[in-house]
Structure formats: structure tokens, C-alpha cells
Amino acid sequence: MPVVELASVTKAYESKVAVNNLSLSIEAGQMFGLLGPNGAGKTSSIRMMMGITMPDSGQVNLFGKPFERKSLERVGYLPEERGLYKKMKVIDQLIFFGELHGVSAADAQTRAVSWAKRLEIADSLTKKTEELSKGMQQKIQFISALLHDPGLIVMDEPFSGLDPVNATLLERTLLELKDQGKAIIFSTHRMDQVEKLCDSICLINKGQAVLAGRVREIKSRYSRDRVIMEFEGDASFLQSPEIAEANNFSGHAEIQLKPSGDAQKLLHEAAAKATIYRFELVEPSLEEIFIQTVGGKADA
């Protein structure tokens, strides 16, 4: 039984169709990436899941039932826009957010302290929101979405404002929550994080799903015609007739072979002119698939 399901939902604002006949479903214990260029309909889709807006047609199901407000008690939501009170102490508003979801003040405080230690921001609990960096505020917002132990976690750009260390900490936390059986859906522009974290994705463009399925299966549709090479020495081999396109980043080369290009010939040519430390034939990244799928088709 899907934890969340959009069944042929459509949403328009005046003359603009934001979401057009979109269907997707997410199971318990699944990490799901909702992707797309700016203005594609990602946030509109999330808002319908949360009941912030209602679809013009189609149906939203939560926990196996048609959408009802009561189901939101089992949902944790991290919006793209922060909703913290600037003048209020962090611990006080976390307790407040917990109580809004039916958690007692005492339990909310215990959980807030536990989560703050886990996310390495315990020292910030007695500070006001306005005293914290954007990254710290993002982690506080993340904690507020988890205090009531939701079964579905919905996040819009969860890594916004986080440096690489804190982004990694959040990634590990999400994987732990997935292992606990939580259904997690997030929208992000960070394809590298989607590739590492997500079991399945749905790529939306102009309100419609243009690519959907399990990440592993999607990537397997594309041929291994890219080479990653690390080398030292003469880079003239990058002019090889086997190559369609090459980018050299100071000894780290990303190469696109021609349809008839021979990787072994390229390796032989490169080894004759440079010292090769790495030569790997790889499938395209999700970022490349994303660009290939929506390139030139996105709204300006």
C-alpha cells in the first residue's frame, strides 16, 4: 500500500497549468526524489500532498485513504520557505511545533534535545532564531518536521543553506529514517544527492512527468559511452577521433565518446602520451540524464 499517492492530479493557477495529469506513488521505507527545472511543478505537487492546495482534478491519497486533514498528523513537512519565529528561542518553538502535532510539552522538549544533539546543534537551543546561520536554521526546521515521529516525511529543498559537512549529516539521518520504514520524498536541484539517496525518482517538466522509475533501472537504459580519466602529462590525446566531446579539469577529464568510439583505442592513445591514474567507462550521471531530458524544453 503506498504511503502517498497522486492519481492523475492536475492543478492550474488562472491560465497556467502547474501540474498536468501527474501520477506517482511512494512506499514505506522508500526515498523518492521529485525533480525538475524551476517552475516545473514540484512545489505545487508537494503542496497538494500537504493539503495546502487541492487538485482541480485527480486524487491525493495518504496512508491508503483519500486525503483528509487528520492524516497530516502522520506527516512531517519541511517547506522551502523557513517558518521559524525570529525572536523566539529555538527550544520554545520546537516545543510549540511538537504540541501542534499532539506531542506533550515534556515529550517535545525531550525529543528536541535528543535531535539537537544528534544534529550537533544542542548549543543553539537557548538562542533566538535570528542569531543562527541559515544552515543552523535549516537544521532546526528539519527537527521541527520530525518531532512527532511521522510516517511520511516531505521536504522541499532540504539541503538549502547547508555546507558539505552538514549536508552529509542530513544525508545520513535521512538514510537512517528510511531504514526505520519512513517514506521520504524530497525535491532538490542537487542531482548528486538524489543519485546517492533515492530509490526512485519522478522528473517533472512543465507540470508533466517526463521520466519516472527506479534510479538503477533508469540509468541502465543509457549506454556506457562516457569516460572519466585522471592523468598527468600531454593532453593532446583529447583530440582523438574516438571522442565527441571532452572537458579537461587540470588532469581530470570527462569524455563523451562518439557513437562508434572505441574506449580501448582511446586508452592506448592516452597511455602513449600521458601517465594514466584512472580510466573508467561509466554510465551517465542523473545530472546528465536530467539535462538530456529537459534541455531546451524548460520554461524560461
Image: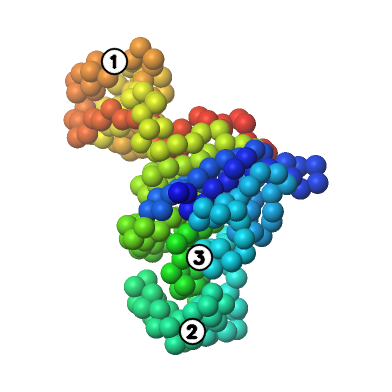
Q: How far apart are the two marked residues, 2 and 1, measured between alpha carbons?
A: 65 Å
Residue with the mark numbered 1 = 262
Q: Is residue 118 left or right of residue 137?
A: left
Q: Is residue 129 visible?
A: no
Report the disc number at residue 104: 2
- Whichever of labels 2 and 3 marks the residue nearer the N terminus, that label is 3
Label 1: few (<14), some (14–19) or many (≥20) C-alpha neighbours in 10 Å? some
Residue at 58% over, 46% down: 6
Q: Nearer the viewer, mark 2 or mark 1?
A: 2
Q: Are marks 2 and 3 in contact (CB under 8 Å)?
A: no
Amino acid found under the numbered disc labelled 1: Asp
Q: Nearer the viewer, mark 1 or mark 3?
A: 3
Along the viewing direction, whichever of 176 and 123 lies nearer the viewer: 176
* Residue farthest to the front, as pictured: 65
Q: Is residue 245 visible?
A: yes
Amino acid found under the numbered disc labelled 2: Ser
Residue with the mark numbered 3 = 74
Q: How far apart are the two marked residues, 1 and 3, measured between alpha carbons?
A: 53 Å
Residue 28 vertical placement versus 149 (above, below): above
Amino acid found under the numbered disc labelled 3: Arg
